[in-house]
């Protein structure tokens, strides 16, 4: 790291900021072959961590030099507008452009629960230092917003101090927490919600709705998010990993689903709907997969998602292609039907236009979209927050990648909120849907390593200001 080179970059950006009388992003990138994003994240347990495949990319961002928070139905459009206005005059020294990290709430109309308060409707950060690893190696980039009144020498001093903290994190030994109590809706009450959904579907008001479960673990100590991510990484299979910190709160997961990615104007996504468990032995696993591929109910649910994705992207893309038949996406505890979809963005359209159009897909919301969301608001009984919503990154050249935040948990100093859901369509069986959520919860529960004796389960009380869920004895 050369302080003189960094000063030169900041000085050039400052000249540009003074000339244009507006902020300018300055980016300076350096090879960092000895720094692994996962290792550095596990040491810091802060910022933003990302590990996705197809293509392989790992990111770790620490510190915040610029942020945007937006609310309402046009939140993605506002993020897009402010980001690309800021990037218009960016000064980039090296092969990597500035890159923005963040995500959004599943439903901006849902009242926000207190544990989700640090996570805005849409919230994106420009990390001060960003470490990346891909097929071209490991790079460390410094990202600063230089104002007309900024002093480049002061910016260099602050950036080098932040780099010292990045390279030399404080040592931390976290005790293994124990579950004081665990709270969730009992099996019979959740299955009654599925029955309600099936009645609405039978009337013809919905063709599909996704119902999720929320399990709140009360802890006697804070979870070590770095250790949890390490365990998720060791078992990731075909999953994408993410961790987004806002103060002492961390939203993390190992999701199988990519919402939408863009590289040089080429979009990639996939329809993901239809699930079964993994087999304990290869022959059993293969038989379960074949049964899933042949199941009429699962095929119907999957086709709904494929059709809706292609229709939603229709006026924003050209050269759209969906594979004629789904394949199997096999994860640690569950396998899914998956149909790859590709397209090219039309002139004047950008990645966040596609994200706005697709979210929520039928795989996490339902069909038709508006009445499905109304059903979820009325019957699900909790705030999803950022669960099942888009999380990801966006660079100054229009490239980016957004995941659907499934198989996830919100970790706070004394709580861990875990989430899982499933799609309800005609022919769904409430008991089977409950077992599907159990399978989906398993990978995150294994990574959390939270032991909870049955006699610690308690009920939500109305005095806590929560939905009055009853105690759970069966899981």
Image: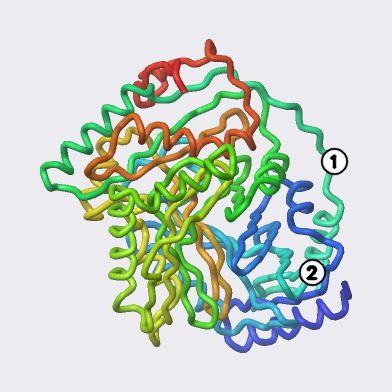
Q: Are marks 1 and 2 in contact (CB under 8 Å)?
A: no
Q: Which percent across, then down, holds residue 241? A: 61, 53
Tell me, what colour scheme is on the image? rainbow
Q: Is residue 63 visible?
A: yes
Q: Secondary structure at mark 1?
A: loop
In terms of sequence position, does the residue under pointer 1 or pointer 2 come before the other? 2
- Residue nearest the observer in this picture, 377 or 169: 377
Q: Residues within 10 Å of mark 2 (few under 14, many from 20)?
A: few
Classify residue 364 as left or right of residue 215: left
Residue 108 appears anywhere in the view: no
Q: Residues within 10 Å of mark 1 (few under 14, many from 20)?
A: few
**How many numbered circles are shown?**
2
List the residue tagged with mark 2: 154
Q: Which mark is residue 367?
A: none
Q: Could you give the CA–CA distance between mark 1 and mark 2, rounded to whole angstroms?
A: 28 Å
Check the image and report above or below for 435 versus 229: above
Residue 421 versus residue 435 in the image, above or below:
below
Residue drawn at x 36%, y 36% as measured from the top left = 433
What residue is shown at x 30% (from left), y 32% (from top)?
430
Residue sticking out furthest to the top: 455
Image depth: mark 1 or mark 2 in front? 1
Residue 472 drawn above or below residue 43: above
Image coordinates of residue 345 in percent, x first then y, are 42, 81
Q: Report whether 61 appears left or right of 322.
A: right
Q: What residue is pinned by disc 1?
A: 171
> Residue 37, position in %: x, y?
74, 58
Give the side of residue 237 with respect to residue 318, left or right. right
Secondary structure under tag 2 reads helix
Q: Closest to the observer: 165 or 206?
A: 206
Q: Is residue 50 left or right of residue 349?
A: right
Residue at figure coordinates x 58%, y 87% from the top left: 20
Residue at image coords 14%, 47%: 205
């Amino acid at each position: 790291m050369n302080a003189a080179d960094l000063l030169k970059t900041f000085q050039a950006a400052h000249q540009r900021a003074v000339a244009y009388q507006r902020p300018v992003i300055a980016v300076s990138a350096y090879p960092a072959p000895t720094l692994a994003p996962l290792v550095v994240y596990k040491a810091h347990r802060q910022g933003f961590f990302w590990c996705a495949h197809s293509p392989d990319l790992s990111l770790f961002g620490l510190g915040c030099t610029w942020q945007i928070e937006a609310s309402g139905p046009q939140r993605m459009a506002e993020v897009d507008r402010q980001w690309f206005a800021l990037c218009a005059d960016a000064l980039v020294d090296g092969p990597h452009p500035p890159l923005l990290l963040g995500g959004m709430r599943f439903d901006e109309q849902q009242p926000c629960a207190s544990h989700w308060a640090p996570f805005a409707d849409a919230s994106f950060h420009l990390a001060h230092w960003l470490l990346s690893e891909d097929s071209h190696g490991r790079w460390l980039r410094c990202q600063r917003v230089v104002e007309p009144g900024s002093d480049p020498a002061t910016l260099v001093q602050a950036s080098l101090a932040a780099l010292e903290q990045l390279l030399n994190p404080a040592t931390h030994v976290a005790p293994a927490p124990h579950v004081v109590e665990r709270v969730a809706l009992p099996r019979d009450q959740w299955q009654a919600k599925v029955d309600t959904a099936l009645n609405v579907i039978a009337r013809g008001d919905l063709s599909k709705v996704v119902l999720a479960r929320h399990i709140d673990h009360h802890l006697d100590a804070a979870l070590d998010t770095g250790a949890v991510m390490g365990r998720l990484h060791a078992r990731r299979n075909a999953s994408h990993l993410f961790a987004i910190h806002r103060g002492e709160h961390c939203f993390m997961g190992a999701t199988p689903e990519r919402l939408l990615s863009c590289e040089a104007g080429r979009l990639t996504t996939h329809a993901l709907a239809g699930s079964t468990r993994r087999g304990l032995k290869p022959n059993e696993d293969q038989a379960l997969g074949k049964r899933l591929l042949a199941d009429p109910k699962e095929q119907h649910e999957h086709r709904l998602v494929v059709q809706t994705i292609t229709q939603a992207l229709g006026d924003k893309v050209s050269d759209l292609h969906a594979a004629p038949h789904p394949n199997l996406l096999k994860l640690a505890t569950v396998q899914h039907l998956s149909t790859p979809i590709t397209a090219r963005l039309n002139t004047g359209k950008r990645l966040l236009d596609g994200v706005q159009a697709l979210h929520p897909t039928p795989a996490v919301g339902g069909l038709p979209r508006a009445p499905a969301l109304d059903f979820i608001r009325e019957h699900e009984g909790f705030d999803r927050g950022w669960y099942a919503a888009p999380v990801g990154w966006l660079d100054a050249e229009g490239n980016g990648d957004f995941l659907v935040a499934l198989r996830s948990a919100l970790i706070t100093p004394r709580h861990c909120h875990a989430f899982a859901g499933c799609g309800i369509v005609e022919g769904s069986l409430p008991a089977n849907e409950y077992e599907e959520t159990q399978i989906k919860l398993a990978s995150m529960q294994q990574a959390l390593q939270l032991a909870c004796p049955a006699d610690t389960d308690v009920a939500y009380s109305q005095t806590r200001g929560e939905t009055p869920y009853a105690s759970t004895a069966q899981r």
